[in-house]
């Protein structure tokens, strides 16, 4: 082998000549090497040597192996592969140029060897092809030699640098050989102050990452600590160290950059158009993904570009000369774009359940490169199909959907329903941020319900869905509201949207009444299929469909109301009827069931409440013409009785006895009952603003009773609690109608009086014998007391008072007039509706012509009118004289002209009148304020000139007159004291003002 196989003498001569001819060049080389030593390649010793070793192994096509050890104060780094050649030596000494223009090499700058200067001033490279040495000391010797004796500029530069010289510009051959088994060894005598063992430890820490970054290296030994790399297949690589083994999943790609993209690069990099990228994803001991949290870009060795991606990026990206930062420009953008595409491929290499772990979640980027990479990766991931779906396919995030809640069973059920629905695992909260970054559409309760609308699935499928969403409904109040719109399969085969108004059958088969009704195709009736019934539906608003609940549904009521019309149009009424019978048997009847269509004995269809049971008690009291083919009522087809019990038939409205009709909150007269308009009108006038009633109750078909069967009819009404209650209702329709239109002895009940009602003697006749008890008669309207409730009552009473054939006592007359006046005053009827009588009954009980009579409105006037012509209802405070006069069309006594008090008298204060203070004291009254005019004989002249003696009088200006007698003075005192009812007590005490008078 030649003593200088690499031509180092020529290399030295060229450098020295350059320095001699241009001292500035010396300064530039010194500055450049100092910059590399102190800046770009500081702390990159092993990185640069490992890159060179990888290139050597790749060039030779062998497995790269590196051995690092301390020996004789030197750090020695041996490697296999291609030995050192002349071009390599020239590149190492060139400082600014690298011979590595092959795109397959990773150490692209010969200047990277400057990293060794961090630990040595005399590096040697020993190879099987020869050995060379760089030396600061030998360089200084060259500069001190005769060749530079005249170069003051170089001497000054050395002085300024304290003797520091460029180490890697002058190279000398040496006679050394590498250890056996290795092609090359770098030998670095450690500078004073460098801790060799500690340096080995620091280098050992870097080895695992270098084995991953440099695929050409297979093994590195650091002071008997072995690190190795082995290919596991399927893109997996294991890096073993003394601490254990770590497995990585790799995804690589390489491609060419166009001339346009690389035009901005320097020549050294522009000639390297082939660029590669590699993503490395750490795996755990079970082979699962173990995403990184923070890392740096590797090119392929670590740079200072911080990344926050789950996998490590190793890329042939253009770097600045110090290899710490990427070079901005189109070429870098192209590499980053390729890296994003390869990342999407890496994601697809991961098991589907773990892929989302590789999505860059929203966070502040760690660097500008990190931000650009994250943006491109998310864009790439959004457009490719890699997300696992429930149906086993893959979906891109743009068309994927994910449940907003974790419900695996829901996902399983919707696998063939919702396109792009992601597997259930991805609904977990841990994946929420990643999927949000990908803008995957989330399906909350509302969206799920919307997607399910119109879906046709078996009832069992829906039950499973309800079961699957139940935990969500319990935990989320908002979801509960949305789930109320879930579809529900019905027993009739339909599927409806919304749980509200759905009825849930209590049984499990077709025998359930709810299912039986649902099969009738009742419009609006929503009975769930028994196989889909789930507790969730009830929590969301569905109701249990017991018999009572079914009977209360508007849909069934509507079907019943339409059943007669449907039957007359050709429909068979019995399926609906039998379903209703089954419900009523369990839950009792409802008022509206009377509209149920049933066949009658004539083969026609009628409402149930128009039919009578064959042995109905009502048949005994009805007019024969009320029952028949063309009559209001008909007989029930006996065949119906063979399908249903009489009790159930009565509950649906079939008549056995009288039926009661009720209506809540009525606002008009009830149709279908006789004379309700008249009752309503009279009641409205009587009650005024308190009308209408909160509830109407009335017995129907009263107008169909035979006239001679009313006693039996009344017994029937009183025997049934429901009709009896209706008859007893105060002011109710039933009692009103019976009192006026029923017949007892050919008359209405209210035209009779009970036998014991002596206060009505003369006005009303005792009711004839009917076999009814008195309480039954009273309920029917037979009178026990005098009442006037309407104009017909008033007209009848006025007529009876004017009947001279009736012997009516004066007390009865007064009471009758009093009742009439009260009815007018209370506006129970309009007096104009009652014809004025031609004769009236006076206070003496005599019947006189109405043209001669007057109504007494002031008590003192009785002294000047003939009692036989006076009509009254009692004392002035007991009746309304004006109302009575209006009804009877009679004048008031006070309106007959001006009355004159004759003669003179003595005027006294009431307290001065003898015995008056004592009498008032005995009765506990204050003596009246005012005066009284006393006379021995008191006379009054009437408008016609007649004079009448009177006991007392009050003139038009209110002056009170009295004769000097206990009788006259008592009445005057009672009037003045406003104690008219005490006039007789006053008279007795004025005659004998002693306490004993009160006690007799």
Image (cartoon, rainbow, N blue to C red):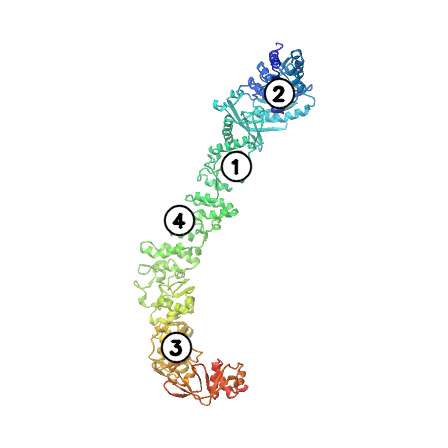
**Label 3 neighbourhood size at 10 Å, few (<14), some (14-19), many (20+)?**
many
Labelled pair 3, 1 in contact (Cβ < 8 Å) = no
The residue pinned by badge 2 equals 33
Q: Closer to the observer: label 1 or label 2? A: 2
The residue pinned by badge 4 equals 492
Whether residue 464 is situated above or below residue 797 in the rendered picture: above
Secondary structure under the numbered disc 1 in the rendered image: helix
For residue 884, the mark is 3
For residue 434, the mark is 1
**Label 1 neighbourhood size at 10 Å, few (<14), some (14-19), many (20+)?**
many
Labelled pair 1, 4 in contact (Cβ < 8 Å) = no
Whether residue 677 is situated above or below residue 969 in the rendered picture: above
Q: Earlier in the sequence, mark 3 or mark 2?
A: 2
Q: Nearer the viewer, residue 129 or 511?
A: 129
Q: Earlier in the sequence, mark 2 or mark 4?
A: 2
Whether residue 129 appears in this view of the structure is no
Q: Earlier in the sequence, mark 4 or mark 3?
A: 4
Q: Closer to the observer: label 4 or label 3? A: 3
């Amino acid at each position: 082998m030649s003593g200088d196989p690499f031509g180092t003498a020529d290399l030295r001569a060229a450098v020295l000549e350059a320095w001699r001819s241009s001292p500035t060049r010396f300064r530039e080389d010194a500055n450049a090497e100092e910059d590399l030593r102190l800046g770009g390649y500081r702390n990159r010793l092993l990185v640069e040597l490992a890159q060179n070793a990888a290139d050597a192994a790749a060039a030779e096509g062998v497995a790269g192996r590196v051995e690092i050890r301390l020996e004789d104060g030197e750090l020695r780094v041996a490697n296999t592969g291609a030995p050192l050649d002349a071009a390599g030596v020239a590149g190492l000494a060139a400082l600014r140029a690298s011979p590595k223009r092959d795109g397959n090499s990773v150490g692209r700058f010969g200047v990277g060897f400057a990293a060794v200067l961090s630990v040595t001033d005399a590096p040697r490279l020993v190879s099987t092809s020869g050995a060379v040495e760089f030396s600061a000391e030998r360089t200084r010797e060259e500069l001190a030699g005769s060749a530079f004796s005249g170069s003051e500029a170089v001497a000054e530069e050395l002085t300024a640098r304290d003797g520091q010289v460029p180490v890697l510009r002058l190279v000398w051959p040496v006679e050394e050989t590498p250890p056996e088994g290795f092609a090359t060894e770098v030998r670095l005598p450690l500078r004073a102050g460098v801790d060799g063992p500690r340096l080995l430890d620091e280098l050992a820490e870097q080895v695992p990452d270098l084995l991953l970054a440099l695929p050409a290296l297979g093994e590195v030994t650091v002071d008997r600590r072995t690190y190795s790399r082995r290919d596991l297949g399927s893109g997996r690589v294991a890096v073993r160290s003394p601490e254990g083994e770590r497995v990585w999943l790799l995804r690589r790609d390489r491609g060419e950059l166009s001339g346009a993209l690389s035009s901005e690069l320097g020549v050294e990099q522009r000639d390297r158009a082939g660029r590669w990228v590699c993503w490395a994803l750490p795996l755990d001991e079970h082979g699962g993904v173990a995403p990184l949290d923070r890392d740096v870009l590797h090119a392929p060795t670590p740079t200072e570009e911080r990344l926050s991606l789950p996998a490590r990026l190793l890329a042939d990206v253009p770097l600045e000369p110090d290899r710490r930062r990427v070079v901005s420009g189109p070429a870098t953008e192209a590499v980053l774009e390729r890296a994003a595409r390869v990342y999407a491929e890496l994601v697809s290499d991961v098991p589907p359940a773990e892929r989302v772990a590789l999505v860059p979640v929203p966070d502040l980027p760690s660097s500008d490169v990190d931000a650009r990479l994250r943006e491109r990766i998310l864009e790439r991931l959004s457009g490719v199909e890699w997300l696992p779906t429930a149906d086993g396919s893959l979906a891109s995030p743009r068309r994927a959907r994910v449940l907003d809640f974790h419900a695996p069973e829901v996902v399983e059920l919707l696998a063939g329903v919702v396109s792009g629905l992601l597997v259930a695992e991805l609904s977990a909260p841990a994946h929420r941020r990643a999927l949000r970054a990908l803008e995957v559409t989330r399906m909350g309760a509302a969206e799920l319900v919307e997607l399910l609308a119109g879906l046709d699935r078996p009832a069992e499928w829906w039950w499973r869905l309800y079961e699957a969403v139940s935990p969500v409904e319990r935990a989320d109040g908002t979801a509960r509201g949305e789930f109320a719109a879930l579809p529900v399969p019905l027993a009739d085969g339909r599927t409806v949207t919304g749980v509200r108004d759905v009825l849930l059958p209590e049984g499990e088969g077709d025998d359930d009444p709810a299912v039986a009704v649902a099969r009738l195709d009742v419009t609006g009736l929503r009975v769930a299929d028994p196989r889909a019934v789930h507790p969730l539906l009830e929590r969301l608003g569905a109701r249990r469909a017991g018999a009572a609940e079914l009977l209360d549904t508007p849909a069934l009521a509507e079907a019943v109301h339409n059943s007669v019309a449907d039957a007359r149009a050709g429909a068979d009424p019995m399926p609906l009827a039998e379903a209703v019978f089954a419900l009523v048997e369990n839950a009792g009847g409802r008022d509206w069931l009377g509209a149920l269509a049933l066949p009658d004995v004539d083969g026609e269809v009628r409402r149930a409440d128009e039919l009578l049971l064959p042995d109905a008690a009502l048949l005994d009291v009805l007019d024969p013409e009320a029952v028949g083919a063309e009559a209001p009522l008909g007989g029930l087809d006996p065949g119906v009785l063979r399908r249903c019990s009489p009790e159930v038939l009565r509950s649906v409205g079939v008549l056995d006895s009288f039926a009661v009709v009720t209506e809540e909150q009525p606002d008009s007269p009830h149709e279908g009952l006789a004379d309700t308009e008249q009752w309503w009108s009279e009641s409205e006038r009587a009650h005024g603003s308190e009308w209408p009633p909160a509830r109407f109750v009335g017995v129907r078909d009263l107008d169909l009773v035979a006239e001679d069967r009313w006693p039996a009819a009344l017994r029937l009404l009183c025997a049934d609690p429901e009709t009896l209650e209706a008859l007893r209702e105060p002011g109710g329709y039933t009692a009103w109608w019976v009192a006026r239109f029923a017949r007892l002895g050919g008359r209405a009940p209210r035209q009779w009086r009970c036998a014991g009602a002596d206060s009505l003697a003369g006005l009303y006749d005792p009711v004839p014998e009917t076999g009814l008890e008195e309480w039954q008669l009273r309920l029917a309207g037979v009178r026990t007391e005098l009442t006037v409730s309407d104009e017909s009552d008033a007209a009848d009473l006025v007529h009876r008072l004017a009947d001279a054939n009736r012997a009516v006592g004066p007390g009865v007359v007064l009471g009758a007039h009093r009742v009439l006046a009260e009815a007018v005053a209370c506006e129970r009827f309009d007096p104009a509706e009652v014809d004025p009588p031609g004769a009236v009954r006076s206070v003496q009980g005599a019947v006189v012509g109405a043209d001669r009579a007057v109504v007494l409105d002031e008590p003192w006037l009785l002294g000047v009118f003939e009692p036989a012509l006076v009509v009254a209802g009692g004392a002035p405070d007991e009746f309304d004289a004006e109302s009575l006069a209006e009804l009877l069309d009679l004048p008031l006594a006070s309106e007959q002209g001006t009355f004159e008090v004759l003669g003179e008298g003595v005027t006294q204060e009431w307290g001065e009148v003898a015995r008056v203070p004592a009498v008032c004291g005995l009765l506990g009254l204050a003596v009246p304020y005012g005066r009284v005019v006393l006379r021995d004989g008191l006379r009054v002249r009437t408008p016609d000139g007649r004079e009448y003696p009177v006991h007392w009088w009050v003139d038009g200006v209110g002056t009170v007159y009295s004769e000097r007698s206990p009788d006259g003075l008592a009445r005057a005192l009672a009037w003045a004291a406003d104690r008219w009812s005490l006039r007789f007590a006053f008279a007795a005490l004025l005659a004998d003002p002693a306490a004993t008078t009160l006690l007799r």
